[in-house]
Amino acid sequence: MLNRILYAVNASSESVHGARFVAELALASGAQIIALNVIDTSVAKYLKTATGASESETAIKLQEDGWRYLYDVEDVCKSMGAKIVLHQQEGLPEAIIAINARRFKAELVVAPHSRAGGCTQSRSERFVIELVERLECPVLVV
């Protein structure tokens, strides 16, 4: 039986699609979902350079996008009757997720897997490997 599931929500449709699975898992085990979006500071720096926007404008845009996906995940989970709380932090996703998994005493971390090809796919695979290495609890990729 699980008490807490940490769901790593990124700004992708995979996060919203995975929410149904996470909610079903939480309902079956009686667990609470802790949905966490991490604003990747390295992505913020890249986007600032690529778009020409200021660093503060880029950070605000990433925060807004993250909250939008968190709210979408929350809507899915609540519509199914699952208990969920939302959090957002800045930093290196692998590190922030590991810190919060320990902080909230999560028995399972669920992470969405990007279906995109090319560099995104390689980044997604590296992310999962790094996450598994940092965590003491199981990791489920959906």
Image (tube, rainbow, N blue to C red):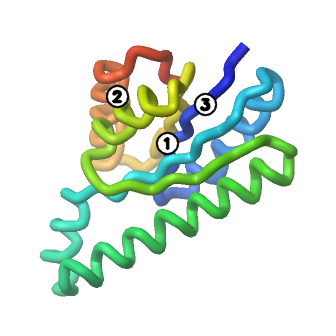
For badge 1, the amino acid type reads Ala
Quadrant for the N terminus, please.
Answer: top right
Which callout, 2 or 1, points at the residue further toward the start of the chain? 1
Name the residue rendered at 56%, 49% in the picture: 14
Residue 33 lies, with reference to residue 36, above or below; the image says: above
Query: Where does label 1 land, which residue?
Result: 8
For the residues carrying marks 3 and 1, which lies nearer the camera in this image?
A: 3
Residue 91 lies, with reference to residue 141, above or below; the image says: below
Mark 2 closeness class: few <14, some 14–19, many ≥20 residues within 10 Å? many
For badge 3, the amino acid type reads Ile
Q: CA distance from mark 2 to mark 3?
A: 15 Å
Quadrant for the C terminus, please.
Answer: top right
For badge 2, the amino acid type reads Leu
Name the residue rendered at 77%, 21% in the picture: 29
Measured as percent of width and height from the top left, residue 40 is found at 29, 55
Name the residue rendered at 42%, 50% in the picture: 116
Query: Where does label 2 land, which residue?
Result: 131
Query: Where does label 3 land, which residue?
Result: 5
Which callout, 2 or 3, points at the residue further toward the start of the chain? 3
**Residue at disc 1, secondary structure:** strand
**Residue at disc 2, secondary structure:** helix
Measured as percent of width and height from the top left, residue 138 is found at 49, 16
Asked if disc 2 and disc 1 are in contact, CB closer than 8 Å, the reply is: yes
**Farthest residue toward the left?**
49
Which numbered disc covers residue 28?
none
Mark 3 closeness class: few <14, some 14–19, many ≥20 residues within 10 Å? many
**Farthest residue toward the front?**
103
**Residue at disc 3, secondary structure:** strand
* Quarter-of-image position of residue 98: top left
* Quarter-of-image position of residue 82: top right
Q: Nearer the viewer, residue 69 or 35?
A: 35
